[in-house]
Image (spheres, rainbow, N blue to C red):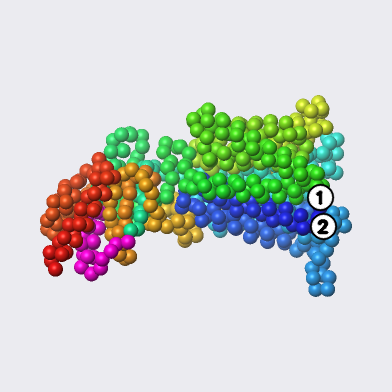
Amino acid sequence: MDPQWALLAGALVFIITPGIALFYGGRERATSMVNMMMLSAGAIAVTTLVWTLWGWSLAFAGKDMAGGVVGDPLSGLLFRDSMVADHGVFTSMDANSGLAGGIPAAFRLACAVVAVALITGALAGRVRYAIWLIFVAVWVTLVFAPLAHMVCGGGLLSPNGAISQALGIQVHDFAGGSLLHIAAAVSAFAIVMIIGGHAHFPLKRLVLHIKNVAHAGTGASSASAKTNSRNAKSRLSRALWADVAKAQDNSSTESVVSSVATVAEVSETSSQSSVENGSVRHPHNVPFVMLGIFLIWFGWLGLMIGSSAGVPGVAGYAWVSSTITASASMLAWGVTERLRSGCFSALGAASGVMAGLSASAAAADVIAPLWALVLGVLSGVITSLVTHSRTFARYDGALHVVSVNGVAALIGVISVGLFADGSGLLSVGDWHQLVAQLCLIGITVLYSGAVTAIVAFALEKLFGWRISEAKERKGVDLADQGERAYDFSAIAQSHEGAVVAVSDDESSKTQMAVLTSVDIAVDDNSLESESASADKQADLQDGKESDSETNDESKKSQSEDNLDEKTLEEEHESNKNNKKSSKSRENNDK
């Protein structure tokens, strides 16, 4: 393969990593978006350093050690087997491939980063960033590098390895179905089993969307604006508590109470997704999920090119075959979802594509187009059913990487033993290839699962993986990164609900608060105390406002102690009348 094309293939594979961050970040709460991007960024940085120091040598460059399990860490230390200085310029040529020595190392590095990034899909919203960085360094060293050596670096499962020689046939994994997807999925499963899934906070589906509207007028108008602000906040607080009480009466099993009494506090929690009775968490940004899967698909084509070992014909067919499988999987997932829930969702389409790409990784170059289509249908249907099964659903998407990437990759690796042209059981009736593929799966699952479980357990005992429950409620973005992905005070949505005008004392703006349907954290123990406190504060504010408010609209607003039946139009009109009456009083005073 031309070195320039090899470099381009490696660059395309790197695009998969930000695609994974968007794919899984969009599926999570808005308060986890920054953290998801940082987990992938940390994966790139730490994996690059480990790969440069000893990872490349352990996986590919080092001499065989430990019976073909791993290479030695010194032969390729700091790429010294691949790079030499020539008149002040570092360069070298690999005599076997004709590629500059650093290009294979760069391409394999991109693949290693993808494997690490896939694990992040199971850890969103609850792990400490520093512990994640430590885990990446250990995992690449102890899990990925040895597996890479065993499968495609001259180890046990390579063409000349002990297992391949014993079976009389070599295992086949074209683009890392076992190395990338199965290993990452099994590792993610091991971590989740140790640290647990998402915390199931009792949540009430309430929402407060904030829209800043420029407030005209200065000087004396600020006093009337503050008066209206206090009145609006009081009415908003009563509306929240009334809806909470109503929901509590309607459901004896759902504990609902909002500890939020002000607009600022509500806006901080408005991004939390709903977890009601163990249901799957809703994604906060479906377009991000779709954008992520398109980037993954685009980068996947580079993986097909780079894995072809410089054979243009193989690269071209693998490109087409993987696209067929991904497309068939997307449609199969959609049909399954349609029969199950009555809709074709964008999330389902994205997950179907991910399943198809994962399934095609091992088999893209050796199965005929018809079998590529069949593989796509199988992977789409099976992964959809597994993802929505009761066992996986109760983890709120934490095991999505297992049910989609892991299961689909298992199907793909097995499909080589069934459909491979010239060696598959269904194509030529030979069972040896199927046995070899099952050995590949067994070694990958057992090794990656056991080592990851030991590493994850050790980190849990030494440092602890998870952030505190209070920080998880608040959001890992603020807790660990000190940043927000979005400023909710500047977001406006058109929803049905109560509209309340609230002034912003600092910016001299009026905020339109629309009470509709998002999730607010629940605290069962503080229901009575916080409800009573909110009522007392509302009554106190109403008493103070009654002396200064003389118009009919203010009296009407003070009597609205149970505002859960107010409509959007009525509240909006009431707000306008309040503003008009304030201006009228202001003119009379002048």
Rounded to the nearest angstrom, the CA distance separating label 2 from label 1 is 10 Å
Look at label 1 and name its amino acid.
Answer: Gly
Q: Nearer the viewer, residue 336 or 238?
A: 336
Q: Is residue 511 above or below residue 28?
A: below
Is 357 one of the magenta-colored residues?
A: no
Q: Which SS class for mark 2?
A: loop
Question: Magenta residues?
Answer: 214-233
- In this rendering, would 106 be left or right of 392? right
Residue found at x 23% / y 53%: 576
**Residue on which disc 1 sits:** 310
- In this rendering, would 515 be left or right of 149? left
Look at label 2 and name its amino acid.
Answer: Leu
Mark seen at residue 167? none
Task: Classify mark 2: residues with Cα within 10 Å, few (<14), some (14-19) or many (20+).
Answer: some
Q: Which of the 4 image quadrants contains residue 81?
A: bottom right
Question: Residue 1: image x %, image y %?
Answer: 81, 52
Residue positioned most to the right: 95
Mark seen at residue 99? 2
